[in-house]
Image: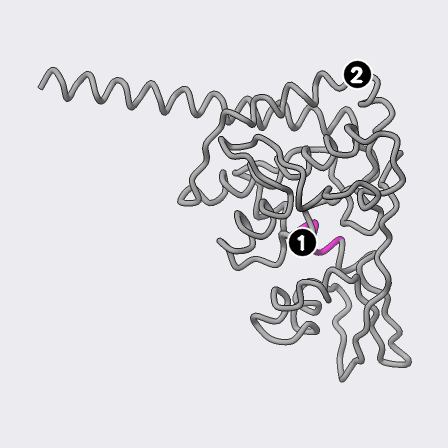
Amino acid sequence: MKKQFILLVLVLLAFKGFSQNVNSFFNKADTFFKDNVSNGLVAYSKIHKDPSKLNEVLALAKTIKVNKSEANTYQAFWINAYNLSVIKGIIDNYPTNSPLDNKGFFDKTTYELGSKNITLNDIENKLLRAQFNDARFHFVLVCGALGCPPLINKAYLPNTLNAQLEKQTKIAINGSFLKVNTDKKRIQASQIMEWYKEDFTKNGKEIDFINKYRTNKLEGKYKLSYFTYNWEVNKQ
């Protein structure tokens, strides 16, 4: 009985420690984004001059373990970790005109996050896309370029995650991710919808996904093509 009690205490202390760490991560990430992001653009020059806050939140992210069974916490952690690591990648190669100017930016450079040593592509494709059937990830994972969805000036949080995913998807679909010519029945979409076509057609055609989030629904048959992605860095 005494051993069981001690074990229970240790489990509770471990859980309390995890809760404090993960909450601290979300709080620090939220403060960092508020201080350094405006209108979807990042103050890279400012961060480069003093990267201490970025390094602090990433150091905390290194120690955290999240489980996909706690889906909202897991997803929110990895979305924030991805966005913060992109900024870290830009800062480490600063000044740079584009993330693509830096070899291996997405598929070779690794970051210590969530007790893993992992690339940006692995966060997106193995930890998020492969685990959850949710195309909305493409509107919150920000790759450091103007063609990406806009980076919000706050952290993604477990208790607000679904609303944040919905909001950012609607902003993209009703904004810069689509160019619609209703007279000619033509749609030009971001190349993200071409590169990850399978994510947008799991529950129908691309037009079905678009109409789910578009304010002005597209009626009739539209011809879909894709416009060139803008890889210029998303700097203020």
Please, what secondary structure does the residue beneath circle 2 have? Answer: loop
Main SS of residues in magenta: helix
- Work out whether 139 lies above or below 191: above
- Work out whether 231 lies above or below 219: above
- Give the residue type that dot 2 points to: Asp
Q: Is residue 118 left or right of residue 9?
A: right
Q: Which residue is mark 2?
A: 50
Residue drawn at (61%, 68%) of the image = 198
Q: Which residue is mark 1?
A: 138
Q: Position of residue 99 (x, y in %)?
A: 80, 42
- Give the residue type that dot 1 points to: His
Tell me where the magenta segment starts and ends, as one range.
166-171
Q: Position of residue 95 (x, y in %)?
A: 88, 31
Within 10 angstroms of label 2, few (less than 14), some, or many (20 or more) residues? few
- Work out whether 92 lies above or below 107: above
136 vs 183, nearest the viewer: 136
Q: Position of residue 69 (x, y in %)?
A: 40, 45
